[in-house]
Amino acid sequence: MEKQRGHVIVLTYPAQGHINPLLQFAKRLASKGLKATLATTHYTVNSIRAGGVGVEPISDGYDDGGFKHAPSVEAYLESFKMVGSRTLNELILKFKHSASPVNCLVYDSLLPWALDVAKQLGIYGAVFLTNSASVCSMYWQIEHGLLTLPVRPEMVPLSLPGLPPLGVSDMPSFIAQPATHSAYLAVIMEKFSILEQNDWVFVNTFEDLESELAKVMSGLWPLVMVGPMVPSAFLDQQIEGDTDYGANFWEPVGDRCLRWLETKPPKSVIYVAFGSMAEIAAKQVEEIAWGLKGSNKHFLWVMKESENEKLPVEFLNSIDETGLVVTWCNQLEVLAHQAVGCFMTHCGWNSTLEGLSLGVPMLAMSRWSDQPMNAKFLEDVWRVGVRAKKDEEGILRREELEMCIKEIMVGEKSDEIRKNASMWRESAKSAVSRGGSSDKNIDKFVEVLLVGRSK
Ligand code: UDP
C-alpha cells in the first residue's frame, strides 16, 4: 500500500470563531499537499462543508448540543477533556492502518489536553492560538512570572515588551478582572504552562501587523505567525474555489444583503455585527439603533435571531431603505463589498483580522475577553478606526455613536484611517501570498511533515 505522507488532524473547539480559523488552516495545509482532517464535535460536523478537507466527529460528552446543556463552563471543559481525549485517540488510531496514518495533531488552544493525546501516540503536537500575538504575550508574561495578577493601580499604565502602554480597560478582561473569569483564565494559563512542549506554536496573525512584538520576542518564545486565516479568494487567491470559510452555524442571508448593498453608493454603508456569541443588553441595542438612525448613513445590521426582539418597534418601522437588519450574513462577502465604508465590530479577533484584511475602517465596541485589547490596537497602533466610549453605566450612547461614525466616515481623520486600512489590506495579502512571511512559515511546517519524518 502506497502511504500518503503527512496527515494532519486539526482539532477545533466547536464555536464559530474557532472553527473558522482552524478550518481555514486545514484548507491551507491541504492546498500545500498534506492530507488534512478537521475534528469537531458530533453536533457541529453537519455545519461544515469544506473542499479538500475531511471532517470527522469526536465527542465532548454532550453530543446533542454541547455547551448549552452543561451545568457550567468548568463542567463542560472537564467533560470535553475526559471524553474528548478518548474519542480523539480513537479517531487518530482509526487511520493507523490506512493509506494515510496521522503524523501530526494541530489543536485549538482551548483544548490543551490534546497535546497529551499526541504525545502518547508518538505523533507531532502543535497548538493553534486564536488570539493576537500581543494578547498571547501578556499571558506568556504571566506564565513566566514577569507580570503578576491582579494588576494593581500603581502598575498602570503597564509597560510590557513590544506593546504600547496599557491602561486597565485596554487589557484582556481575563487579566483586568481575573476573579470574574477564573475558569477561562485557568484553561488559558494551562495552555501557556505547556507551550514549550509543543512541536509548533501557531498563531493567527502576521509579522508586519505585530512587528514590534515579533522583534522583541524573537528567539524568546516559540510562536510561529501563519495568518491571517481568511479564505484565499479575499486575499492571495492561491486556493482555487476557496470563497468562504465553509462553516455556518446559522443560515446566512446572502443574496438579499448583496442585492441591497448593490443599490448603495461606494463606502456609504455601516456594517454592524458583534460576532457569534453577542448578547447585548436591550438598553444598548436601543442606543445603537437610534445612533445609527441619527447618523443618516445606510446600515446593514446583523442581529441574531435570539436578539432580534430587543430592537425597538418604532425603529424598525422607521428605517425603510436606509437600513437592513438580518439574522446572519456572509461577513466576508459584506466586508468585501465596495458599498461598505465602516465596520462597527465587537473586535473578536476573527472580525478584527477580517476588517484589516478587507481594508475596512472600524468602529470598535468591545465587551470582554481579548476584545478591549484588539480595540486598543485598532485605534492606537494600526490606526484604522476609533473606539466608542461607554458611559458610567457601561452603555455606548447614541450621541457618542453618531460622533464616531462621523469621525470615521467624513471627519478630518477619515482620509488617514482609510489610507491605513488599505495599507493593512496590502500587508495582509502579501503575508499569505507565495513567499510572504506567513506563507513561508507554513511551508516550513508542511515540509517537515511531507518528508515523513516520524517522531
Ligand atoms: N460572522 C459571519 N456572519 C455574521 C457575523 C459573524 O460569518 O453575520 C463570522 C465572522 O466572519 C467571524 C466569526 O463569525 O469569522 C466571528 O468570530 P469573532 O472572533 O469575530 O467573534 P466571536 O464570535 O468569537 O465572538
Image: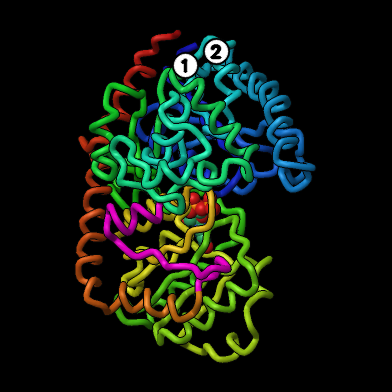
Q: Which residue is disc 1 drawn over? A: 197
The kind of residue on which mark 2 rests is Lys
Q: Position of residue 21 (x, y in %)?
A: 46, 43
| Residue 384 included in the magenta stretch of the image | yes
Queried on whether the Cβ of the residue with tag 2 lies below 8 angstroms from ligand 1, the answer reads: no
Residue 34 position by quadrant? top left
**SS of the residue at dot 2?**
helix
Q: Position of residue 424 (x, y in %)?
A: 25, 53
Choose between 180 and 184: the one closer to the eye: 180
Q: Which residue is disc 2 drawn over? A: 119
Q: Is residue 4 visible?
A: no
Rendered position, 316 above or below 310: below
The kind of residue on which mark 1 rests is Gln
**Quick one: quadrant of the C terminus?**
top left
**SS of the residue at dot 1?**
helix
Q: Position of residue 83 (x, y in %)?
A: 73, 26
Rendered position, 368 above or below 42: below
